[in-house]
Image (cartoon, rainbow, N blue to C red):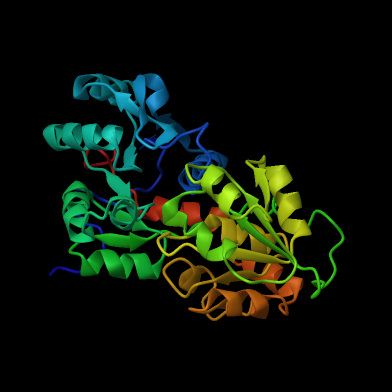
């Protein structure tokens, strides 16, 4: 199968001197997730570079709640309406960030009009759908491969995800790392080494089956377990694990304070593409414990800033001995400025040539 990582240079030349960018996304505020945060930071840093960025989101159209995810709104619109909005923006570059209704509508329009566009692979939906419904992942990969086949470049957040997409028949996959806002995420309190008799283990994220939160909550660990976030499993988890402290959804500033107060950040997910929360936690001086899977093996890798083990309990206990300064230093190797430059390098002229 083809394993292309470079963008085609004939019909969709790379951008230089980009003035305007339209990002089409089905994930938008008030949703609280890594995709929304990534798009928000990307928009901000493009604007810092002097690029006008518009977002085409579900808020422009009538919506319905996504089944089992009521906070996610799905657009009810027509391709013609989406086409009119894109024409009104008239951007230099077009980027389709999600594979939802707006993403598919934009894909259809772009193919009809001969517009070039890039896409992003933010979420491992084949694995998510399999975890929630049991539908075989190859079936879902077939749908997603078709979606991204029209893209001039598929932006993947890590080398592991890129390799996985190529293995599943995707073409023109390029790496696009993510970052962390160090002006928000930094130690907010005076920190000490972990109290080994009463350490605080923290999870931050959705309380949903694909996040594998129960793998953390069922561990026999000393000290306390804190959980920040909400989702369809929250009431069930509270009943099964009442000894944990459930904190809910926090602002970014309050979340930074929470990170700063804990001793180990536990990331039990087996299906994330990246895991921005790991970077945020480390930036606040919080070592990470995780499984050695996509996301952690790229974000943590061989760094001493975290402990990766197929035995999550072992990883949690190992992470207690990691110095906070080590975690902070590793987080500083990531920035949104670098990530935005990578994305800029991948973008192509929507109409095939500089106007």
The answer to which of 84 and 36 lies nearer the viewer is 36
| Location of residue 180 in the rendering, given as x and y in whole percent from the top left corner | 60, 55
Tell me if I can see residue 2 in this picture. Answer: yes
Q: Quadrant of the N terminus?
A: bottom left
State the image quarter where residue 354 is shown: top left
Q: Residue at x 71, y 75 (%)?
A: 320
Q: Is residue 64 above or below residue 181?
A: above
| Location of residue 299 in the rendering, given as x and y in whole percent from the top left corner | 52, 68
| Location of residue 256 in the rendering, given as x and y in whole percent from the top left corner | 71, 51
Tell me if I can see residue 334 in this picture. Answer: no
Q: Quadrant of the C terminus?
A: top left
Q: Left of 264 or right of it: where is 273?
A: left
The answer to which of 32 and 310 lies nearer the viewer is 310
The number of discs equals: 0
| Location of residue 59 in the rendering, given as x and y in whole percent from the top left corner | 42, 23
The answer to which of 121 and 206 lies nearer the viewer is 206
Q: Left of 15 or right of it: where is 237?
A: right
State the image quarter where residue 330 is shown: bottom right
Q: Residue at x 65, y 80 (%)?
A: 318
Q: Residue at x 57, y 41 (%)?
A: 48
Q: Residue at x 24, y 42 (%)?
A: 353
């Amino acid at each position: 199968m083809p394993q292309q990582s470079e963008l085609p240079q004939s019909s969709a030349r790379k951008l230089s001197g980009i003035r305007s960018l339209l990002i089409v996304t089905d994930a938008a505020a008030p949703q609280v997730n890594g995709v929304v945060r990534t798009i928000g930071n990307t928009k901000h840093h493009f604007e810092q570079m002097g690029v006008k960025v518009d977002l085409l989101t579900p808020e422009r159209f009538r919506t319905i709640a996504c089944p089992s995810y009521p906070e996610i709104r799905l657009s009810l619109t027509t391709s013609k309406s989406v086409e009119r909005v894109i024409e009104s923006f008239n951007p230099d570059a077009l980027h389709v960030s999600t594979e939802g209704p707006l993403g598919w509508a934009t894909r259809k329009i772009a193919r009809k009009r001969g517009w070039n566009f890039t896409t992003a692979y933010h979420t491992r939906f084949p694995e998510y759908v399999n975890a929630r419904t049991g539908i075989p992942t190859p079936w879902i990969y077939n749908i997603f491969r078709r979606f991204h086949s029209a893209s001039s470049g598929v932006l993947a957040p890590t080398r592991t995800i890129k390799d996985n997409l190529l293995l599943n028949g995707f073409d023109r996959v390029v790496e696009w790392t993510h970052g962390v806002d160090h002006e928000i995420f930094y130690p907010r309190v005076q920190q000490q080494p972990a109290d080994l008799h009463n350490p605080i283990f923290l999870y931050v994220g959705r309380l949903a089956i694909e996040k594998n939160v129960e793998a953390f909550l069922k561990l026999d660990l000393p000290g306390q377990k804190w959980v920040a976030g909400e989702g369809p499993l929250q009431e069930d988890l509270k009943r099964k694990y009442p000894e944990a402290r459930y904190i809910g959804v926090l602002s970014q500033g309050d979340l930074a304070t929470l990170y700063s107060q804990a001793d180990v950040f536990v990331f039990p997910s087996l299906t994330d593409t990246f895991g921005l929360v790991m970077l945020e936690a480390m930036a606040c001086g919080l070592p990470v414990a995780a499984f050695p899977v996509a996301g952690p093996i790229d974000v943590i890798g061989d760094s001493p800033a975290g402990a990766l083990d197929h035995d999550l309990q072992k990883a949690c206990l190992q992470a207690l001995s990691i110095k906070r300064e080590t975690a902070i230093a590793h987080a500083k190797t990531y920035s949104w400025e670098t990530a935005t430059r990578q994305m800029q390098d991948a973008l192509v002229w929507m109409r095939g040539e500089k106007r």
